[in-house]
Image (cartoon, coloured by chain):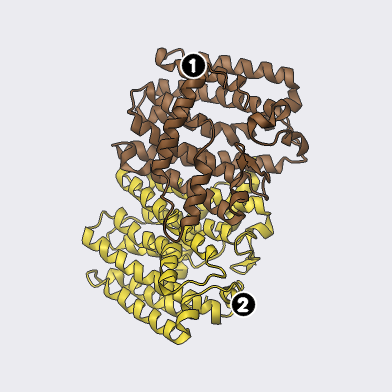
Chain colours: A brown, B yellow
Amino acid sequence: MTGSPFDAALADHAGNVERMLDRLLPRAEGPEIRITEAMRYAALGGGKRFRPFLVTQSARLFGVNSESALRAAAAVECVHIYSLVHDDLPCMDDDDLRHGRPTVHKTFDEATAMLAGDALLTLAFEIVADPATHERARVRVELVRRLAAAAGAHGMVGGQMIDLASQGKPLDIGGITRLQLLKTGALIAFSCEAGAVLGRASVEAEHALHAYAHDMGLAYQIADDLLDAEGDPVLMGKKTGKDEAAGKATFVSILGPDRARAQARMLAEQAVQHLDLFDERADLLRQAAHFVITRRN
Amino acid sequence: MTGSPFDAALADHAGNVERMLDRLLPRAEGPEIRITEAMRYAALGGGKRFRPFLVTQSARLFGVNSESALRAAAAVECVHIYSLVHDDLPCMDDDDLRHGRPTVHKTFDEATAMLAGDALLTLAFEIVADPATHERARVRVELVRRLAAAAGAHGMVGGQMIDLASQGKPLDIGGITRLQLLKTGALIAFSCEAGAVLGRASVEAEHALHAYAHDMGLAYQIADDLLDAEGDPVLMGKKTGKDEAAGKATFVSILGPDRARAQARMLAEQAVQHLDLFDERADLLRQAAHFVITRRN
């Protein structure tokens, strides 16, 4: 926390997302209590809630009511969290720590972590499909369709697959860009478009948000690679230096840290330019582009 | 295959489901090819396609067109297959064989199997949400909502959790009934209701199908327990005797095989009675109730 107004807005928003998730996650009760406990452990009490922030800020541009926006935001976060829970498992990245706490499979066990991830992914679609998310069925089902496309085999999961398959077989810059557009870019793009769908925005506005999300997503990932290479594991609440240890090519290993930093800055500036057709309601999205390349965790 | 007309209808239908899945599964291409190959390996070339059969047969009662019904059927099968792929993993049941073939993690690896399961679950929602599944958004989003509820923490995944948690701590008959209503019953119930939703059936017709599905689901599970206790592993294409080895209570271990068999028969008869308000278009559903308690794999 640097105490900037943007940080304060992000933290304030994270509290809203936390409360919405608490409302939407199943209660910990019944004989299946272990699964609901694991879901709550995974989803509550940590994280910047950056993707949800993109959802609510893009929704704000079109005057979407906050209940709708926060529900869609919570759904995106459920998808993000499920991917982290599965990614942390021994058969994937084998991580013990996430947001400074033991990972789900460490606190529970591997089977419970896998099932909790499965249930969080499923819950995301249940949340979006619920009439409380938007009065129009057409809007809800369009969100479902896009969320599924962003999360699936030609989206986030496809990116995770490329990432795994590339260990020991380093990718070139085109390969890494493709990997990241799928692995992190697709869900970030969905987050920005969700507001446009909820607000039934013009095609022009939607394209602008998509272009913003594209550049933001890559900038975000380069910053992530820089943090993994140079960041403080205590501040980050997780292990660093993992890419190098795994023999993975990253933007940093290919471009070098200085060019990677310059590239991230260029992408962030470009992202902001895509927002030119919006008024001051887009200011936090503009600041978000700066935030992603200067964050320290 | 005993060669009865019902078996022939089921086999014929399985071919239709196979072709629809082949159409809907992502092509095996791009750098993420390993994930799409694993999804195709898991989903194609095996299985009775019993849940899809319930979808298309219930849809038939209301004159739903076969493209709509088969798409919904394929989506249900994707959810079923994802659950098998995850269930077979070492951290769950640790099975090497499924439908007489090596399981996904044996043919690929654990990480790929987990991701392929994730992608199949995601694909199910993408299929249902696609306008090709039904012209009305309200119908599609209602299917999404119900499918998510049936598959999630208070549905199938909750049942898997109870199942895991009960190893070494055998459940009583009430506990087992609850477990099975979630683990297998919820998706079977959805399969029967999907036709009603697609066909915008009356509440009365939907309730009848729900009651049918409830009894069918339990009968199906008792038959499954009997097959695990007494079945031929060669015919079944997978290991048997697993419940006893895992120290799990089942309908068979609690009731004994004779009373379990009688109970399954009673449930199947009761299931058929719930179909009294339908005409001869429900005949295959009637025969399905007989099929579930006499099948040998």
Residue A92 lies, in percent from the top left, at 67, 47
Task: Give the residue type that dot 1 points to.
Answer: Pro
Res B296 visible: no
Picture quarter containing residue B193? bottom left
Q: Residue at x 69, y 28 (%)?
A: A232
Residue at which label 1 appears: A5
Cβ atoms under marks 1 and 2 closer than 8 Å: no
Closer to viewer: mark 1 or mark 2? 1
Q: Is residue B112 above or below residue B11?
A: above
Res A266 visible: yes
Dot 1 falls on a residue whose secondary structure is: helix
Q: Residue at x 28, y 59 (%)?
A: B63
Residue A145 lies, in percent from the top left, at 43, 40
Picture quarter containing residue B229? bottom right
Task: Give the residue type that dot 2 points to.
Answer: Val
Closer to the camera, A102 or A90?
A: A102
Residue at which label 2 appears: B234
Chain letter of the residue beneath label 2 in the structure image: B
